Image (cartoon, rainbow, N blue to C red):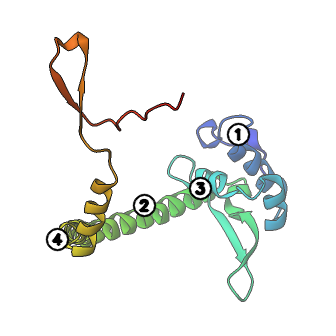
Amino acid sequence: MKKLNDFNPCYIPKLNSQAYQLLLLLLDNDEVAETELTRIFNGRQRSPLQILGGDKYCWNIINHTNDKGVIFARSLDPRHKSGSKPDDAKARAERKSEYKQDSHKLAKQGRIRESKAFIESIRAKSELADLVSNAANDDHYNQQAQNEKANTAPTVKASNSNTGGKSLETRHQPKKESKE
């Protein structure tokens, strides 16, 4: 059974990181229950799992599932713990190949989806423009706009000695007479 210091440092995540903590758990145990990972990582074990199994470290993590496909435990590929450098290298190469295939598949899906998403965004903008245009020509909309205009203050003429005796048009409410 290999320990952490038996591996090339390039395969070891940063000390005290969640990925490092997960790796220690997987190296020390044949299998780690998903409930335990959920408790330790507060339900956020996805990130350290992705980091360990990702392109940089290529640890092959095995998901143990029940008959309904629910993951109940995780473990490292036994070849990582075997003590055989060729076996460890093969497990990493398999994981890297799987990772790159998944990455390629996602890239293709994104590329295929891109044109459809672009067309959908153009249609949505067009629908919005139609609604705005129709609203401007809608009698109900126009009546509301007229009502809003009617509720605004009328234009009143005010004179001020500072204006040289000329009247000014303003949009202010006329001043109410005080009752004294």
Residue drawn at 68 percent across, 71 percent down: 63
Earlier along the polypeptide chain: callout 3 or callout 2? 3
**In this rendering, position of residue 77 left or right of residue 180:** right
Type of residue at label 2? Lys
Task: Please tell me whether residue 153 is drawn above or below residue 1 in the rendered image.
Answer: above
Q: Which mark is residue 39?
A: none
The disc at residue 50 is 3
In-front residue for pair 39/48: 39
Which mark is on residue 137?
Answer: 4
Residue in the image at 38% along x and 69% along y: 105
Tag 3–tag 2 contact (CB < 8 Å): no
Crowding at label 4, few (<14), some or many (≥20) Cα neighbours within 10 Å?
few
For numbered disc 2, what is the local secondary structure?
helix
Task: State the residue at coordinates (70%, 88%).
Answer: 68
Residue type, numbered disc 3: Gln
Residue assigned mark 1: 17
Disc 3 is placed on an element classified as helix
Task: Point out the image quarter for the C terminus.
Answer: top right
Q: Camera-side residue: 69 or 173? A: 173
Please state if 10 lies on the left or on the right of 155 as rendered: right
Query: Who is closer to the viewer here, 37 or 124?
Result: 124
Marks 3 and 1, how far apart at CA: 13 Å
Query: In which quadrant will I find the N terminus?
Result: bottom right
**69 vs 44: above or below:** below
Looking at the image, tell me whether mark 4 or mark 2 is earlier in sequence order: 2
